[in-house]
Amino acid sequence: MVFHSRSTKASKKKIDLAKLKPYLLNAGIVLLVGVYVYAGALLIQFIERVPVRVEESSRVRRDNENDMPIIAMDRSKECVLQALRRIVVNSNGNCTHVQKNMSLLDACYASDLRKLDSVYEATPTEEEPKEPALKKYEIVDGYEQWTTTDAILFCFTVITTIGYGNVAPQSFWGRVFVIIYGTIGIPTAMMAIANVGKFLATLLKTWTRPFLLLCRRVKRKMHRKEGNTGSEVKETQRLMESSKRKAKKIEDDISSHEDEEADEDVEESDVTETIVLFVAFLIYIIAGSLLMSYYEEGMTFGLAIYFNFVTLTTIGLGDLVPQSTDWLFVTLIYCAIGLALTTIAIEIAADTLKKLHYFGRKLDNVQNVQIWFGGQK
């Protein structure tokens, strides 16, 4: 008896492990994708970093260009000296003449002042609003490199084919890295997203099954109440027609009737799955938009809806990019689950198109259909 109880416990453990095995496998694939994204971010940071002195030399060149109007101002000294000589000669010590001839000095500086005004107007000040820069850098150990946030977001958008384009490699080896990284990462990420999508589809079916069963029961009761009217007459006609047919024909009718009911059940389940998925997708976008409008600076609810739709459909225009570093992990998880929902929608749409194509081919043979009326063709 003791041996039997131990064997039953061992068999239960094996059954439990067998049930958990698919979930553990999917969790391992998702974890692998996460590690792959982080490792790729570190590599692209290392490949694309440049020494700080290169940027400093370019800044010196820009400063020299801004100093060009001052050099032109030094060249106007000759004009000033000539104006002073004319003032001394014409004034003869009279102060009123000196004040009248000061316009000569103003004329010498007028052109230079206009040049300086144009330079200051073209140079943005700190108080003026600036457009958000497409590239952000951080200096580490004397090198200028991508920020960790931008690097992680870049690798995530590469393997999910979203491709915001807010940052892009500029070096040759950086572009080679993107080709190799995407070749390996895109199939792995798509497999993980597909597995998550199947898991979400199973959850949606489990959660909505009681509600759908209740709706079907109510619908059948309504049909039964409607069918009671004139049921006796219909039953008599059915018996008279069936007596004229052969037993084989009756069996064929029964089997075909069962097939039609099964087809109707399948079609009804497909329609309900499509409706449930559409409602879930809308709720997911609205909930995510409310959350993002809370923690993303400058992103309103309307912009968040636009961003989520563009991201989850992998359009990835790149005009809006997540900026919050603290909420980056939440944003990536949200995008990954949303991509899984989009994958389910694409599969359902593909199955629907296949059924429509099959139904269209069946309609081609409609002229060969035989119609029975009153036991006769």
Image (cartoon, rainbow, N blue to C red):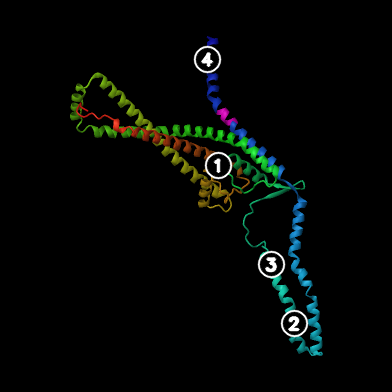
| Contact (Cβ within 8 Å) of mark 1 with mark 4 | no
Q: Position of residue 363 (x, y in %)?
A: 34, 34
Amino acid bearing label 4? Thr
Q: Is residue 210 left or right of residue 171?
A: left
Would residue 313 be counted in the magenta stretch?
Answer: no
Q: Which residue is mark 2?
A: 104
Amino acid bearing label 3? Tyr
Q: Is residue 147 above or below residue 217?
A: below
- Real-space Cα distance between discs 4 and 2? 111 Å
Looking at the image, tell me whether mark 4 or mark 2 is earlier in sequence order: 4
> Which residue is at 58% across, 31% downward?
27
Amino acid bearing label 2? Leu
Q: Which residue is mark 4?
A: 8
Q: Which residue is mark 1?
A: 335
Q: Is residue 200 above or below residue 141?
A: above
Mark 1 vs mark 4: in front: 1
Looking at the image, tell me whether mark 3 or mark 2 is earlier in sequence order: 2
**Magenta span: chief secondary structure:** helix
Q: Secondary structure under badge 4?
A: helix
Q: Which residues are magenta?
A: 23-28
Closer to the camera in the image, 100 or 279: 100
How packed mark 4 is, by other alpha carbons closer than 10 Å (few <14, some 14-19, many 20 or more), is few
How packed mark 2 is, by other alpha carbons closer than 10 Å (few <14, some 14-19, many 20 or more), is some
| Contact (Cβ within 8 Å) of mark 4 with mark 3 | no
Q: Which residue is mark 3?
A: 120
Closer to the camera in the image, 27 or 182: 182
Q: Is residue 365 above or below residue 130?
A: above
Amino acid bearing label 1? Cys
Q: Secondary structure under badge 1?
A: helix
Mark 3 vs mark 1: in front: 3
Q: Position of residue 46 (x, y in %)?
A: 72, 42
